Image: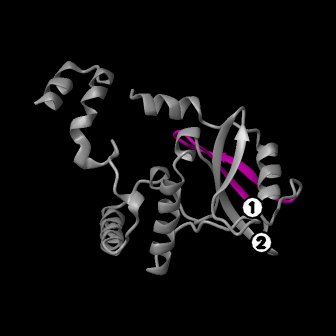
Amino acid sequence: MSSGEIQRKEQKPNLALTDIADIISSLYNFQYNSSIHKLKLLDSYDDQNVYINGIYDEKEIECCIKIHNGVESKAPEILDCQNQLLLHLYHHKFNVPLPLFNKKKERISYICINNITHAIRLLTWVKGTKMSDIKPSLNLIYQCGIYLAKIRISLSTFQHTAAYRIHSWDLKQTNQLKEFLFAINDIQRKEYIQQ
């Protein structure tokens, strides 16, 4: 595992749900009442994601709170790129989460936890069913392909300086993945990949 990946795991936030509700209420025009609203921890790789519903700017709303690990939080240009990308897709009529403004009219907030600065974003919730929760039909898979192609076409006009970076998850960087071969136990599979 690369040192960046290790740092992301070491600097993953792990706040109590009640603390998260208080933090969001202090940073955003968001009101949460535990007797009527819901707060639920979501799956996450190296950030902390939480579902929350409540009142934002006097409207009932469902959101995802994304508390970034300490590594990503040091790269505000990447977080801004993610926000701008979502806004770009929204303006091209895609149903995507939207980054909401905090009390300072900024789309990214920061907090310090155990001497580590963490970026926080409050994103609107997009309702739906995860494909991992169903057995998708061939037609659904086909429709997903069409939808992804439309997103790809829309992104051809997206420009942001932070979108141009080297990232291990980019298919162009497949050769970088050699350092992870140790994780494959099946000898035949490892030999196949090494070819």
Describe residue 69's horizontal placement relative to residue 144 as left or right: right
Magenta stretch in the rendered image: 36-54
- Given residues 132 and 1, the one toward you in this image is 1
Disc number placed over residue 53 in the picture, else none: 1
Q: Is residue 122 above or below residue 181?
A: below
Q: Name the residue beneath numbered marker 2.
A: 60
Measuring from the top left, give residue 153's x and y in whole percent.
Answer: 30, 73
The amino acid type of the residue labelled 2 equals Glu
Q: Is residue 112 left or right of residue 10?
A: right
Q: Is label 1 in a helix, a strand or a loop?
A: strand
Q: Nearer the viewer, residue 90 or 43?
A: 90
Residue 50 in the image: state x and y as whole percent. 67, 50
Q: Is residue 117 left or right of residue 190?
A: right
Q: Position of residue 130 (x, y in %)?
A: 50, 56
Residue 159 occupies which quadrant of the picture?
Answer: bottom left
Q: Is residue 47 magenta?
A: yes
Image quadrant occupied by the C terminus: top left
Q: Residues within 10 Å of mark 2 (few under 14, many from 20)?
A: few
Give left or right: position of 55 versus 187: right
Location of residue 72 in the rendering, given as x and y in whole percent from the top left corner: 52, 45
Residue displayed at 49% across by 68% down: 84
> Is residue 95 something one can see in this rendering?
no
